[in-house]
Image: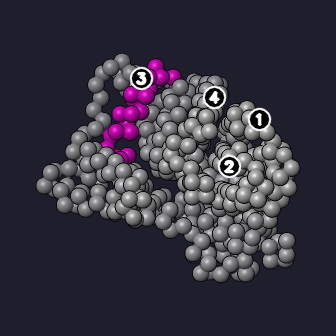
Amino acid sequence: MDFSQTITLILFLVTIGLVILRWIESVAAALMGVVAMVMAGSMTEVQAFQFVDWNVIMILISIWLIAGYFGKTGIPQYVADYTLQLSKGSIPLFVTLIGTLAGFLSMFIDNVVVVLMLAPVLFHIRKVYHFKGTGPLLFIGLCSNFMGTALLLGDLPPQMLHSVSGIEFGGFIWQFGRPSSFIILTVTFLIVCTYFYFKLQKSELGEAHIHEKTTQAVSGEKVVYIKDKRFAIIVCAGFILTIIGMSLRQHLGYKLGFIAFAGALLLVVVFEIFKKPLGMEVPDLEEMITELDWKAIGFYVSLFALVGGLEHANILKIVAAWFTPYIQKSLFLGTTILYWVTGPIVAVVEHDAYILTILYVIRDLSRTSGINPWPLYWALLWAGTLASNLTIAGAPALYVALVKGEKEDSTKWSLRQFLGYSVPFVVVSMIVCYILMVLIWVVPFM
């Protein structure tokens, strides 16, 4: 590693340290890191701009706008009370059910969007039961970042695997006569959610008291949440059409960001034209734009630039080269090392660039040495997804959950409080998934 690479790595680690410790505002620390990398010559200001995936940023802004309208339809409140009835008034069970829903939604919808959709559901019940919302929302964020690799649509890593290996949708469910990503991650996810249900029971959530209004809702007394059905129907239709359009991106020939922007713009235009003739109570566009979490968007932008600088300095390739001898020596040893070393790396590095680099390394190794690449592919994707839940630097969805939770509670969480949720979640999920992976995908191919 030369001097320039060393400086780049130091700047990156210092920046991520500030982001995680949150001594100053995380987005400010991340942006300062980008400026420092540019000034140190790790990348130019033009390259820093180019490293940002503006397509993803446009997806986030557009879907967040649609999710903002969705939060005002009354549907989240309806879902909240219906879920509460299923949980029979148990707040730990309610939070667990909402988290489980978040996990399965994230197979089709961006994880940050899932957090934004379900936050109003949680906050509605929080205000009735008078418990702190940051921890439960953080659990929802952890769940939403869990199942994105289960199917081809959910997250960028499975799409990158498709690009590198040619795997199709069905391969994520069943491959080579054995269960693959969807089944293994679902089993792991349900075990982790069960574990957290008992953990939440021992927390303050287990003692949350029932408010009279909630007692009436649970007992079956009718409460009207969706006051303007036309507004709710239009929002849901716009959201569904946008998701359908994004799922058909290959046939439409447009970028996902453009499709998402078109969906959000169509929704806004429909409201601007028809809200007065139809007498709908639609929030002003200025209000909706103001409610977007611009700090989180800035955080995303800076993370893309930081990881881009790291990749530009070829540091990720150096890490990849370190794996190669172990993979060539033994499939079990190589898969195990790849799995457990990937964990701490993606905890501080936004995992997309890292996963893409290692995917190409595995593909090239399989071609030159004749090893079966699939145990390694799955080990990389599963570890890269599960371990990214350790910090807000690895999973920006957790940053969004943390910021919204703290704003709702008017309190700031310490790093110790955050790790009290993230560490058990990551450790349990990685251990369970590793055992399943070894039994199903490593031992049979040794």
Q: Nearer the viewer, mark 1 or mark 2?
A: 1
Q: Are marks 3 and 4 in contact (CB under 8 Å)?
A: no
Answer whether residue 58 is visible to the viewer in this image: yes
- Going from the N terminus, do you reach mark 2 or mark 3 first? 3
> How far apart, in angstroms, are the residues tagged by discs 1 and 4?
22 Å
Magenta stretch in the rendered image? 70-90
Q: Position of residue 301 (x, y in %)?
A: 56, 66
Q: Label 3 belongs to which residue?
A: 85
Marks 2, 3: nearer the viewer: 2
Q: Which residue is mark 1?
A: 443
Percent x, y for residue 439? 73, 32
Q: Earlier in the sequence, mark 1 or mark 3?
A: 3
Q: Quadrant of residue 352?
A: bottom right
Note whether 162 is above or below 151 in the view shown: below
**Sequence-first disc among 1 and 2:** 2
Q: Residues within 10 Å of mark 4 (few under 14, many from 20)?
A: some
Residue hosting label 4 = 191
Q: Are marks 4 and 2 in contact (CB under 8 Å)?
A: no
